[in-house]
Image (cartoon, helix red, strand yellow):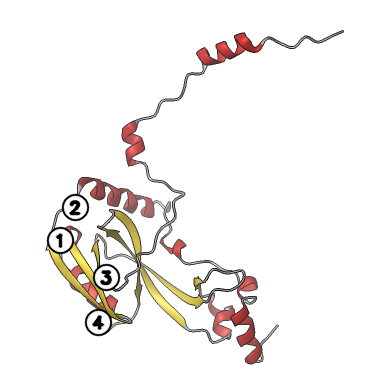
Amino acid sequence: MSITPADTTNIALENTVKQPPELVSLADLATKSDKDEPLTVLTIRPEPVYVSLFTDQGLPVTTHYLERAETWTGGYVYCLGKDCPACAALVDRKSFVLLPVVDLTDGLIKILQVLAEKGPGRLLTELVKVLSLPNRADIVTKISRISYQQYVVEAHREDALKPDIAAAIKRFVQEVEAGLVDLGSIVTRMPASEMVQHKRIARRLELEGRGT
């Protein structure tokens, strides 16, 4: 018995009729956030940045900075506490508060890494000058770095947030509260088994007499 190939012409026509393209709401598309887009760190270089400090709530983290290596691009990793290879290797440990802000130059919400150190010119101390104001979200805050870990934070001028930025902030806050956004994702979670293989960590552990 032979099998004759089916004529797919009618089937294609039937599928075209029975399965119309799915329609989407432009309003929903415009307000939908991209969950796959990673959070971005706002880096303060010699030129000033202009931000909206819409919240004073940040995430405290304790980190180590690991230099670039063959299998590592370089950057901050979480301190692992009691059994942390970086601590055992006496690598400098730093504590930050990860503070969400709006970068007013492009309207995007980014993360400001605020070193948890107080004192004149320290970013944490300087930011409080604006964060303590009741209308902080509507203030264009100008942050300038004048030297290493020395900053000037100014309430530059008052300017109401644009509706699209205000809507983005509202969505962001809701997503953070719902656990959909992890502020700590900008710091790498590196297991001890991988951290101990970092070239500098391994060498320092060896010099400390704690090599594996």
- Local secondary structure at mark 3: loop
Residue at image location 60% in from the left, 74% down from the top:
195
Asked if the residue at tag 4 contacts the one at tag 2, i.e. Cβ–Cβ closer than 8 Å, the answer is no
Image quadrant occupied by the C terminus: bottom right
Which numbered disc flags the more N-terminal residue, 3 or 1? 3
Cα–Cα span, label 2 and label 1: 11 Å
> Residue 82: where, in percent of width, then height?
56, 80
Amino acid type shown at disc 1: Asn
Amino acid type shown at disc 2: Leu
Which numbered disc flags the more N-terminal residue, 2 or 1? 1
> What residue did someone put label 1 on?
135
Q: Residues within 10 Å of mark 4 (few under 14, many from 20)?
A: some
Q: Which of marks 3 and 1 is in front?
A: 3
Q: Which of marks 1 and 4 is in front?
A: 4
Cα–Cα span, label 3 and label 1: 25 Å
- Local secondary structure at mark 4: loop
> What residue did someone put label 4 on?
121
Residue at image location 58% in from the left, 85% down from the top:
88
Which numbered dot is residue 29?
none
Instruction: Name the foreground residue: 172 vs 67.
Output: 67
Q: How crowded is mark 3: few (under 14 residues within 10 Å), some or many (20 or more)?
A: few
> Residue 189: where, in percent of width, then height?
53, 66
Amino acid type shown at disc 4: Gly
> What residue did someone put label 2 on?
161
Residue at image location 25% in from the left, 50% down from the top:
165
> What residue did someone put label 3 on?
47
